[in-house]
Each structure stands twice: as C-alpha cells, then as structure tokens.
Amino acid sequence: MSEQADQRTQPTDEERVEMLETMLRIREFESRMRDNFADAEIPGFLHLYIGQEAMATGVCQVLEDRDYLTSTHRGHGHCIARGLDTARMAAEIYGKETGYCNGKGGSMHIADVEAGMLGANGIVAGGVPIATGAALSSKMRGTDQVAVAFFGDGALSEGAFHESFNQAAIWDLPLIGIVENNQYGEMSGIDEQHPPSTHDDLTIYGEPYGAHREQVDGMDVEAVYDAAARAVERARHGEGPSLVECVGYRFEGHHEGDSEFYRDDGEYEHWKSKDPVETYPERLIDEGVLTADEWAAMQAGVETELDEAIEFARESPMPDPQQAYEGLYADGGDHR
Amino acid sequence: MSLASRETEEMAVRDVINQTLDEEMERDERVYIQGIDVHGRGGTSNILKGLDEKYGRERVRNTPISEVSIVGSALGAAATGMRPVVEIMYCGFLGVAGDQLLNQVAKMRYMFGGKLDLPLVIRTKNVMGANAAAQHSQALHHWLAAIPGLKVVCTSTPEDTKGLFKAAIRSNDPIMLFEHGGVYNKTGQVPVEDYTFEIGEAAVEREGEDVTVVATQAQLWNALEAAEQLGEEGISVEVVNPRTISPLDTETIAASARKTGRCVVVDDTPLSYGTQSQIAADVSEEAFFDLDFPVQRLGIPDVPTPFSPSLENEILVDTDDIVDAILTLA
C-alpha cells in the first residue's frame, strides 16, 4: 500500500481556479491539434494528453519557477501546465521557425530550458536520468530546486527508470517521479506490461529504492496537487526521491489515427464520467468558488487565446532550409 | 607546435590525465567526476587516484554500476549548470548507455533548436593487446563518430592529452574522450603552462617527404617507430595525428597526402566502416590527383578481439605491419 497523507494539502480558491483554467487550456489546445492534424495541417504524428489534464496540472501547480521537469512523447500537457506559451508550442508542432525549437523538435521534443522544462522526450523513460541529473545538479549547487520526471506506466519497465531511482536513492536526490498510469503502454494493457503483483499499485516499483510513495486518482486535480505538494516538500528538504502514481485514462489513442482496437466495451464511458475538464468546473461552481458566468468567460478567453495561437502557427514562416545545418554545436554550425 | 621555447616536463600519459583533471577541478568548481569505482584506487586504470581525497566525495562521485543513469544524470547536470566528467570503465560499456548517448546527449542541443550548452565530457578507454577478450578489448571511437552531435577525441601523447583534455572540459559541447590503455604508460615532454588544443585540429607529429601515415593512439606510437626505422633506410615518413575523429581535420591530413603522394591510415577500429575508411575516403576525395597509390588501410580484421595471446596477436596491427604497408607503396 502507498503511504497515506497525514494531512491534506489544500489548494487555495485562487489556485483551484488557476488549475481549472490550465486543464481547460490543455484540453482545448489538444482538441485543436487533433482536429487540425485530421485536416492535414500538421506534419508527422501526434500523441495527445486529452483525459490526463489533471496530472500535469496538479503537479505543476505546486512547483516553483526555479524547479525542473522532464516530459514524454505525450508532453503538450506538461508544457502548458508549466506555463509555456501556447503560440510558440503550436508553431513548433506546425514545424515553424517561431516554435520553441525553431522547428527542429516538433510535437515530441518541445523544450524551454530557461523555464526549467528540460524537454519532452521521444524515448520511453529517456527523461528520467536527465531529471535525476538536474536533481543532482541542484544538490551540488546547494539550491533547493527539485526535479520532476513525468513518465507513463510503460516507463516502469525500462532500465533507465530503475537505474535513475537507484542512483537518486543512494544520493538522496530531490527527484519526483510522476507515473501517469493511463492504462496503456502504447497499445498494450497493463497486464501485458507488468506482473499482477504490481497492478493495484505501480508505486511498488519505488519500494526497493525507499522512495516516498503515493497513489492518487489522476482524474482529480486536487488529489494530484495534494500528493505532489508532499513529494515536493520532501524533496526540497533533502528527504530524497518520491514516486507518485496518477491513475487515469487516455481518451485518445496512443497517437492520432490509432484504431483503438484494444479498448474494452464500456471502458471509455466509465472513465469519461470522471473527465476532469467536465467534473471540476461543476464542482467549483457547486462550491461557490466560480460562477457560471466566470466559467463561460474563462472558456471564451481560452478559446480566443488558442485561436490566436493557432493563427500564429499557421502564419509563421517555415524555417529556412539552411537552418538544418545550424545549432548542432556551441559554435552554432555543422562540423563538416 | 614547438616545444623548444617552452618549459616542459617528462610525464606519463596517465599522470597527465590526473594532473589535468586536478587543474581543471581547481580552476572551476562546476567540474566534477562521476563513474564506477572512482574513489580509492581511482577507477579501473588508477588514473584518478588521489582526486577524491583532494576534492571530496561530492565532486568525485562513486556511482552504482548503472551506465544509463551515469551518462543520463551527467547530461541532466550539464544542462543545469554543472560540468561533469564521466568515466566509463571500458569503451564496450558505452553500449549499456546506448539510448542516452544516441538519442539524448547527441541530439538534445540540436533537437531543442540549438539553445542549450551541454558541457559534458565522457571519458572512456580503447583497449587492444591486453588479453582482455572481446568485451573489454576493442576500439569504438568510430562508432560514436558516426553520430552527429557528438564530438569525438582520441588522445595519444602526453602533450596532446593535456591540451585536448583542457579543451574538452572547457567546451560547451558533449565530448567523447577516448583514451587508450596501450598509451597510459607512454612518456613524453609536456609543456608546464596552461594550454588547450583546438577540438578538430590534427597535428603533424613528424615531418617527412615520401609517405604519410595517419595514425591514432597506440598506433601513433607504432607509426613513429616505423618512421624511425624507415628513416634509417632512407625513406622519409610523415606522421599525422588526427587528435579529433569528429570533427575530422581533413584539411591537414589531405595536405600531407598531397605533399607525399602516398597515404597509409592505421587505427585500432575494425577495417570495415572504421575510422580508416572515413579518412581514406576523405583523402581520396581531397587529394586524388596528387596520389601515386590508393590509400592503404590498416586496422583490425572484422572479428571481435579473441582472448588467447596467439589469437589476439594475429589480429593486432604492429610496427612491422606499418613498415610493410609503407614499403608496398615505396
């Protein structure tokens, strides 16, 4: 069993509204990407975060600007929750010069190192050692920065996860692993990826490393916030690594165009009833934190912002082909 | 570079590495070491001995036997303000860290739009002729040099070891720094002053007129010996040390080949798809009409390194092989 909280960390009303807006922004951003990809506006392929909004949002809400994070191939939500600019994100996904990586990275590699966002990553568990290094760097430089590695349930089968958590535990590093259990590793269910002894609680993978462990409802942004707050607090005070499992669901396929042959009947509907972007505004309105008018205004505001972001991406220039030879090394140029 | 006017001291390569790391750690507190068994005896080859006592175990960090996280965490540290120097015990163990080298270290700057400095040095060693068998005995600089985004340096002499180490540690790019077990105890004159050798610049180690030998690491020492022997027979051999494998200083190498009209390339990587092939191709493209003979390649026949001395000696390139190759061109 995961360790249970002694005391729940409650977000302020202001934070609750912020989290709702972040989740909405992720949902709307991803929905636009899905539609525009279907319209063949976007090159390559896309892995969308729809359904998992509460996970990135709850975690990033408790981070400070000075903290670090690494992300995954399904990384748009982490970027938005971190506060990255949706226009530059959209431009990157469209392969435009104005994108975060000047069109060299695309959907799977959005990064803003100055903002502590050390990159989305196309390799499962590829970012976990990098976050471990950021945590090591914080410790060696004597700061209280923490490093969060987001990864999926599939990453728990990778050596990179185990090597990193082992090292982080031995060195007492401020590393927080967020397992986003969306029920599928690519297109295979959890029963094909992990032994039965782990299915009820994937944080058991953190047990031999002595990690602080919590399993939370990944469709409940406040439960995520609460667990993340404790993990971050521990890390900041030198109490070593944590592993938090957010149990949730991916409403879209592994990538856009995936036939989703693997879903069971009724499964989608079960999880859809927990959809955080639908349940959370109702809750905040019920509790008097938000009025229906304010919710409508928030939706309109996000819609306008994202319309503008997409317009920016569409109208931005493609990179000059010669830029293919730039940016490989510190002197700026290609070496041959 | 002339040593004539500078104060020098006689040192072995292994001591140069230790002293250079010491100086760079003294100079910049962001420089730190991590690797397996780097405490105490100072790594498998005892190169780091004493640095843990001087700088403490925070800056000379013993890692678990975890090449993925050794390399990956150094990358994360390099991206966030530190300047790690990683030790990978034998170059064959780079394979364990494959994804981090291939997909993370090499691609991070470019993939993120060129905005990120990655001051990361990964030291490892090529080994041949030590009866260490296939996994501990191979040369792999050509393998990493095939990945755009990594700069690959091969150290050979006491003098270039100091200059190249200092340049690598001060560089803001990831550098794969290949040492060679066969040269650790070689000695030579090393300038006492602080200096760097530019990454990407080759050096003419011995001037000659009749034939160019391009040689790395242990083979550089063999090539210099071959040149000495042939000099006594009236054949003037020029020896070029590439120093950096990627980026390769094709200009210096091709200029030498144009001058002599004959070129032999010798290196401890396998012959097929090895360093020799790349250098031979570059020389052929750049100097074809000045060459009197096709470029000759010497290296390891395409087999893993066998254990038994009688088998290993069969596949190794030695001074006699280099002499023979030169004589076929004479």
Image (spheres, coloured by chain):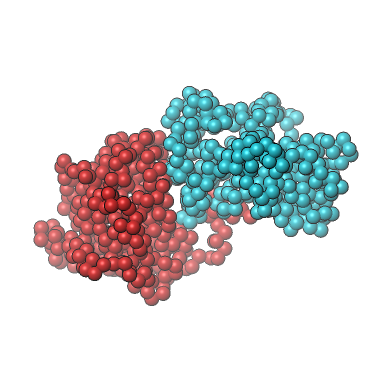
Chain colours: A red, B cyan
Q: What residue sits 48% from the left and 36% below the top?
A: B35
Image quarter of the C terminus of chain A: bottom right
Residue A264: give x, y in percent of width and height.
26, 67
In the image as oriented, which residue stretches furthest toward the bottom? Answer: A39
Foreground of the two, B304 or A33 = B304
Foreground of the two, A242 or A196 = A196
Q: Quadrant of residue B293?
A: bottom right
Q: In which quarter of the image is residue A49?
A: bottom left
Q: What residue sits 62% from the left and 49% below the top?
A: B142
Foreground of the two, B329 or B79 = B329
Residue A213: give x, y in percent of width and height.
26, 44
User: Relative to residue B252, is residue A99 drawn left or right?
Assistant: left
Residue B89: give x, y in percent of width and height.
54, 37
Q: In which quarter of the image is residue A174?
A: top left
Q: Can residue A330 be seen in this view?
A: yes
Residue A5: give x, y in percent of width and height.
18, 43
* Number of marks in picture: 0
Q: Is residue B30 visible?
A: no
Q: What residue sits 37% from the left and 71% below the top?
A: A257
Image quarter of the N terminus of chain A: top left
In the image as oriented, which residue stretches furthest toward the right? Answer: B234
Task: Check the image and report above or below for B229 versus A302.
Answer: above
User: Relative to residue A327, is residue B222 drawn left or right?
Assistant: right
Q: What residue sits 61% from the left and 27% below the top?
A: B15
Task: Check the image and report above or below for A27 versus A57.
Answer: below
User: Relative to residue B204, is residue A255 drawn left or right?
Assistant: left
